[in-house]
Amino acid sequence: MTYKVVGLFGGVGGIELGFEQAGFESIWANEIDEKAAITYQLNHSHHLEVKSINDVEVKEVPDHDLLVGGFPCQAFSIAGYRKGFEDERGNVFFEVIRLIEKKQPRVVLLENVKNLVSHDKGNTFTVIKEALEAHGYRIKHKVMNGMEYGNVPQNRERIYIVGFKHEEDYLNFDFPDPIPLTTQLSDAIDFESKLDEKLYYTAEKYRFYDQLEANILSHETVYQWRRQYVRENKSNVCPTLTANMGTGGHNVPLVLTKHGIRKLSPKECFNIQGFPKDFQLPIGIAQSHLYKQAGNSVVVPVIRRIAENLYATLEKNKTISHQESLSI
């Protein structure tokens, strides 16, 4: 059976890609960033609405079985929420709830940073959980690390929240178990070839190059410049990729290659997120935008494994139609 997916805050489409790999059909998505939308549309054929979620009208969104998205984390007060959202206008999470309320998808998958659970002393997560439950969804959530659940060489912890409209689906679903990490950094990073000169650090370009040269000694791990010192990642995986790594500073992952010390290329960042090797990056977009897109994205194999379990869950109860979901 074909289950239809709608994506919010689509970025470059990493969540949708993971679901497609698991057998789902993406039919519609939304993304506000025009540069990310170029990458999205280069790799996906379904419709992408490029505008703020605040401007998305319910009638624009086709009926679907699953609503997915990695939404921005914003603070809001429990008091304001319990008064009826009056104090929380402008918070994008409630735009997600607005669409859920009208479209009633069978399953909702939301992805966010690990600290969502403790954000604002736990108030943020409490509101999210209560809002989903108030609209008839039973919730399961789990923090999962890409290196433990996605077989990617990156230390990246994220929380995944799954809401189910039907109790049978809720009872039948389990998150994936950990799997061995067999993918090596060398599978994602090219330590052998000479790449774009802009990626390399030299004494002429960086005043702290002597510290890099003295401390970056291994070809088998990833380093970071931490403003005053070099940090080596002892676990031989890449530290969490961030959206601002293309702007310099202390978030840039560095490697020692045959041709010198350099930062990761945008393509290597997408590799470390588990995107397939044939995933295309647009030509003519500034590298800073591509780094941001990679850092904002998801570990695709983790999404695929969650989606595979969801597909199996829905297949156990495939007598439930979308119309039945709407009627609850």
Image (cartoon, rainbow, N blue to C red):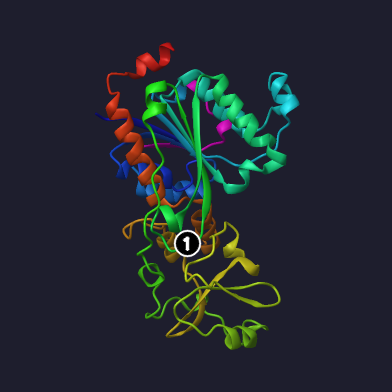
Q: What stretch of residues is rendered in magenta?
A: 46-58
Q: Position of residue 101 (x, y in %)?
A: 52, 20
- Above-or-below relation of 323 to 67: above
Q: Position of residue 263 (x, y in %)?
A: 52, 73
Residue 237, relative to residue 115: is it above or below?
below
x, y percentage for residue 125? 63, 35
At which x and y percent is residue 146?
45, 55
For the residue carrying disc 1, how many other residues have a C-alpha within 10 Å: few (<14), some (14-19), or many (20+)? many
For the C terminus, the image quarter is top left
Q: Which is more toward the observer, 134 or 275? A: 134
Secondary structure beneath disc 1?
loop
| Image mark count | 1
Examine the rendered structure and indicate whether residue 234 appears above or below residue 18: below
Mark 1 is on which residue type?
Answer: Gln
Using the image as rendered, state which of residue 37 and residue 306 is in the foreground: 306
**Quadrant, the N terminus:** top left
Task: Give the side of residue 23 with respect to residue 60, left or right.
Answer: left
- The quarter of the picture where residue 133 lies is top right
Residue shown at 30%/45% (left/top)? 21
Asked if residue 240 lies in the magenta stretch, the reply is no
Residue drawn at 30 percent across, 23 percent down: 317
Taking the magenta stretch, the answer to whether it contains residue 53 is yes
The structure residue drawn at horizontal position 40% and vertical position 17%, both measured from the top left corner, is 325
Residue wearing tag 1:
154
| Relative to 8, 5 lies left or right | left
Name the outermost residue toward the left: 1
Does 293 sit left or right of 151 as displayed? right
Q: Is residue 17 visible?
A: no
Asked whether the viewer can see residue 186, the reply is yes
